[in-house]
Each structure stands twice: as C-alpha cells, then as structure tokens.
Amino acid sequence: MREFDRIVENEAASPSIDAHVSAFARIEAATPSKSFDLPLPGTRSRWPRFAAIALSIAVFTGSTVYVALTFQWGSIFQTLKEVNFVQVMGYGGASIILYWMIRALRWHLLLKRTGTKVPFFDLYMCTAVSLSFSIFTPLQSGEMLKVELLKKYGMIGRFPGYGSFLVERALDLATVVAIAGVSLLTAFNVYRSYALFLIFGSLIFAASGFYVLYRMRLRGRAQQLLDSINQSAGNLRGLLSAALITCVSWASVAFSWYILLHCGGVQIAFFKTLALMSIVTLVSILSLIPGGLGISEAGSSQVLIWLGFASTAAQTGTLVLRSYSIIAIVLGVGHIVVWKMVRQLRNRRLSAAPVNPLP
C-alpha cells in the first residue's frame, strides 16, 4: 500500500487499479481541460511533411544501394561465422539495460523537480519500453510514448511529462553534437571547420535555451509548458547535474557499441567508438529514416574505414552493430510483459486488501 500511496500523491492513482479509476476521473474533471491539452501541430500545409518523406525515401534508397553494391558480402559472411552471438546478446543486452537505467534516473530527477513522484520501477520500465521502440521511429520520436503511458496510468500530468521530456531532448542534442565536434578534432584530426561549427553550435544552442527558459514569456498553454520546462531544468546546478548524467548515458551507448564491435572482431579504442557513435547517431537522426536503416550501415562502415580499419572488418562490424537495435526490441518486448504482470499483481493485492468502513 505504501507504493500505491506514492502514486496517489501525483495527479491520479494508477489506472491498473479499478477501485481508484473514479477518483482519477474526478480529479481530471475538476481540472480545466485546457491545462492538460497541448496544441496540435499546424496542418495548414502538407508540403514540409511531404518533403521530409521524400528526403527519407531518397536517402534510404541511395544508402541501401550503396550498401548492396559496395559491401564485400562473401568475406563478411565468412567473418560472421566466427562471431560468438551468445556473447553479443549477453554483453550487448546488459549494456543496453545499463543505458536504460541511467536514462530513467535522469528522468526521475527532472520529474522530481516538478513535484511529480513516480516509483523508479515504473519510470524504468516505461523508459525501457519507449526507448526500445523509438529506435524505429523518425527522429526517435517514439520516446514520447513514455509520457503518454504514465499519463494514461495516472502517474504524471502532461505538462510535467512533456516539459521534462523536452529538457531531456535538448540535453541529448547538445551532448551528441558536442561529442561529434570534439571527435572530429581528436579522433580524426580533420574537418576542423566542421568540428568548430559543431562545438560552437552546441554552445549557441545551450545559450539560446537559457534565454528561452529564464527570459521569454509566452501565453496560455505555451507558457504552462515553458514553466514545466523551467521547473524540470531547475537552477544552474540542477541543470549541470542532468547534463552530467546525459554525458554518462551517451558514454554507456558508446560502451555498448564498443562491446559489440569487439565481439565482431573489430579491436577499436573506446574514444574512437565514442567518435563513431556520435557521428553516426547525428547522421541517422538528420536523415529522418526510422532506425537509420541503410544510412547507419553506410555511415558506420565509412567512419570505421576513416579510422584505419580494413573494409571487410569495418563492414562486418557495422552489421554486428545492427544487432543493438534487434536486442533492444527483444528486451523492450520482455519489459512490456514484466510490467504488465507487475501491474496486475498490484491490482490483485489492492483488491484483496480489506477496506475499513467509514465511521
């Protein structure tokens, strides 16, 4: 019952408990609907969406053709036979779970600043599920699913949820861009102009974010969302702590890639893996291709070749890296099953608990 009480401290009780659904409904009914509904994106013009889809199709087609024609498939299949896929699944899965736990910890701290208290187990399970399926969504936008899931289960409000999510996305973007810029200067020692552009771009992005948070004033629901973002970010010390966790989380992603590449026979240094991860991640996101299919393989193999690896080893390592997405999807499905079983168990325990009659 103590765990359930912590959930009730938020805007509603867990909807997996039928006995408390009506209480949640009364809270929602007592709150003006405007405070929870975010404005829908403008739909006056479909040209931007059409252009984005056309660009994704063009990039996907070009990269797929490049991979099909340039990869040395005979040598790759011979090398793949020597890969221990049991180690790939075991070590890769453990590193992915570590990444999900770090991300859940960051979200927990951001939500806590808004006064939202959610059990860490639910935050972790929701984060794991959303991150696993966001891999195959454009711009990894599927991660927003975690906000809607917890809102559906009555654990958070929409504004605190999306406010903290936008802070997470801003920190992720600034961190990956900064890592990519530093990597171009250190691991490659080339493209200095691009590297400086990325580094200064991340600094300008951070400065603009500070201005929006602490200076800009909007109206209506936009201001409510901005207030939630401001609460999530907190003061400078709190924002720096969230930024530090963000750096650790992306380092854990690079660690996952490092493990997978070594399992695939690519003996690469960790700082070079960090460079590979940041650059390929940026290219995959900007391509708007779900999961970076095609472009990720083409980009990873080319970057590994720039780092001095033979083309066969680079292409084999690239295909082993694709197992990261497959392992994440499998683990995501497993987390869904476990989370559902836990919620059902909570429901049974609360239903069986005696109800003290009112005096």
Image: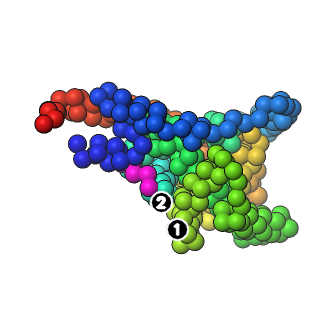
Which one is earlier in the sequence, the residue at label 1 or at label 2? 2
Magenta-drawn stretch contains 94: no
Crowding at dot 1, Cα within 10 Å, few <14 / some 14-19 / many 20+, comes out as some
Q: CA distance from mark 1 to mark 2?
A: 9 Å
**Residue 1 position in % (x across, y down):** 23, 42
52 or 17, which lies in front?
A: 17
Left or right of residue 114: residue 187: right
Q: Hey, which residue is sitting farthest top in the picture?
A: 18
Q: Quadrant of residue 218?
A: bottom right
Point 48% across, 56% down: residue: 114
Residue 44, label in figure: none
Identify residue for label 2: 113
Q: Is residue 277 left or right of residue 262?
A: right
Q: Which residues are magenta?
A: 115-119
Instruction: Determine whether label 1 and label 2 are within 8 Å by CB.
Output: yes
Question: Is residue 211 rendered to the left or right of residue 248?
Answer: right
Please state the horizontal and vertical placement of residue 208, each as a whole percent of the image: 74, 64
The residue wearing badge 1 is 238
Q: Which residue is depicted at the point 70% across and 65% down? A: 215
Badge 1 amino acid: Gly
| Point 62% across, 65% down: residue | 271
